Image: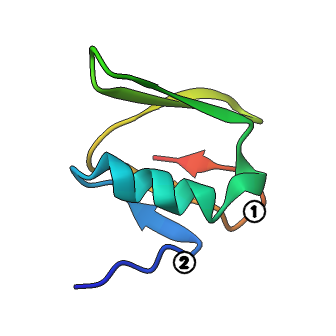
Amino acid sequence: MDKDFKSETYTVDESVTDTLIWLMHHQEIFDSFHFDTHTQELSVTHAAGVDIIRVGMFLNAKYGILVTS
């Protein structure tokens, strides 16, 4: 199944690349991101703070800010 990277919602799976592509389509909702190659951990800084993005998380861009579950 094809992923809709322009969709306002996204469920994180094992593909860090796909998560980064979704974030790039919604650059207005976050300030920065950091990927630690040693721990394979993606963190995103946004208006509400910093979140570690993990598989299974629900990302939402509907309100102009990044909302995570």
**Mark 2–mark 1 contact, CB under 8 Å?**
no
Of mark 2 and mark 1, the one earlier in the sequence is 2
Crowdedness of circle 2 by 10 Å Cα count: few (<14), some, many (20+)? few
Secondary structure of the residue carrying numbered label 1? loop
Q: Is residue 45 visible?
A: no
Secondary structure of the residue carrying numbered label 2? loop
Residue 51 against residue 7 in the figure, above or below = above
Q: Which colour scheme is used?
A: rainbow
Residue indicated by mark 1: 63
Residue 44 against residue 59 in the figure, above or below = above
Q: Can residue 55 be seen in this view?
A: yes
From the top left corner, tell me how far across and down residue 12 is, in percent: 34, 54
**Where, by quadrant of the figure, is residue 36 drawn?**
top left
From the top left corner, tell me how far across and down residue 22 is, in percent: 51, 62
Crowdedness of circle 1 by 10 Å Cα count: few (<14), some, many (20+)? few
For the residue marked with disc 1, what is the amino acid?
A: Tyr
In this rendering, would 69 be left or right of 37?
Answer: right
For the residue marked with disc 2, what is the amino acid?
A: Ser
Residue indicated by mark 2: 7
In this rendering, would 43 be left or right of 32?
Answer: left
Q: In which quarter of the image is the N terminus?
A: bottom left
Q: Which of 60 and 42 is in front in this view?
A: 42
